[in-house]
Image (cartoon, rainbow, N blue to C red):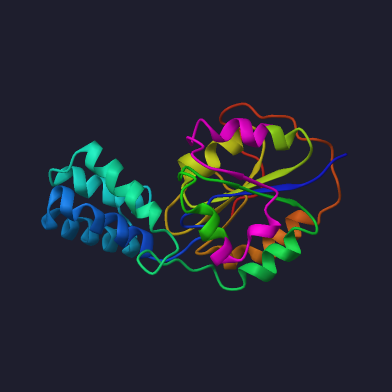
Amino acid sequence: MQRRTVVFDFDGTLALGRGPLDAYAASLGPLAGEDVVTACQEAIGLFDAGGTRFKDAYDAVRVAALEHGATDDQLSAAYLHSRELLATGAAPIHAPDGLVDFMAELARSAVCVLATNAPEVGIDRALSVLGVTDVLAGVHCAVGKPAGLGPIIAAHLAHGPTLAVGDIWENDLAPAQLLGADTALVGVTDPAGTVTMRGATLTDLYDDILTWATQPRTPTPVPLSAGQAPGRAL
């Protein structure tokens, strides 16, 4: 039986707010020094302003920390500690406006799935805080995007049209597009290819995603060759 599936990213898509980022940067203090923390906070601000070289705000922290003497091991330890604090008072998050109602409506027409590079630690608590636990048919953590997203998308494409939603083109959308899935870009970064839809936040895309999810059933998509781009460009 054919079905439509929407595969959501987590950080920057379903989960908003600087809480986890600030916790990540702050966790570097005891390991690499307060100068590194300051540099990371400045880099986050630059990313938020737009037009930077960073893939996302987490990449901004990583790049700034490395440039100011932090090591990969220190970054890994700080990140894991910040995820242990995820969705607590020390690393608060919030949902896009209207997320609970949107996801409940979407789940009546499509299978909703989460695919994130974040580890499993803290995810259950975060999804509960966001109010979306019950509408997600699958939760995939530590996916290893971009390469790890491909098998997830392919599995859902085998059952019908699939839409990938995320804020990083290279990680969340490009692997899906190459397999023939539709794509929805969230945030301030520009894609390196054509996307089906885009918005500053997920809230801006609610109507477009619901329209996509309620379209009449169509034949199962045939995977596209690299370089081909399905959908309409906005």
Q: Measured from the top left, where is residue 17 in percent x and y?
A: 42, 66
Q: Measured from the top left, where is residue 5 in percent x and y?
A: 72, 47
Q: Is residue 211 magenta?
A: no
In the image, residue 142 sits, relative to residue 126, either above or below, namely: above
Residue 101 appears in which quarter of the rendering? bottom right
Image-based side of 133 in relation to 21, left or right: right
Tell me the quadrant of the picture where the C terminus can be found: bottom right
Nearer to us in this view, 139 or 110: 139
Image-based side of 166 in relation to 152, left or right: left
Nearer to us in this view, 233 or 204: 204
- Does residue 53 appear anywhere in the picture? no
- Residue at image point 46% right, 40% down: 170
- Residue at image point 51% right, 53% down: 123
Image-based side of 174 in relation to 212, left or right: left
Nearer to us in this view, 21 or 224: 21
Q: Measured from the top left, where is residue 81 in percent x and y?
A: 33, 51
The magenta segment: 128-154
Tell me the quadrant of the picture where the N terminus can be found: top right
- Residue at image point 35% right, 47% down: 80
Total count of labels: 0
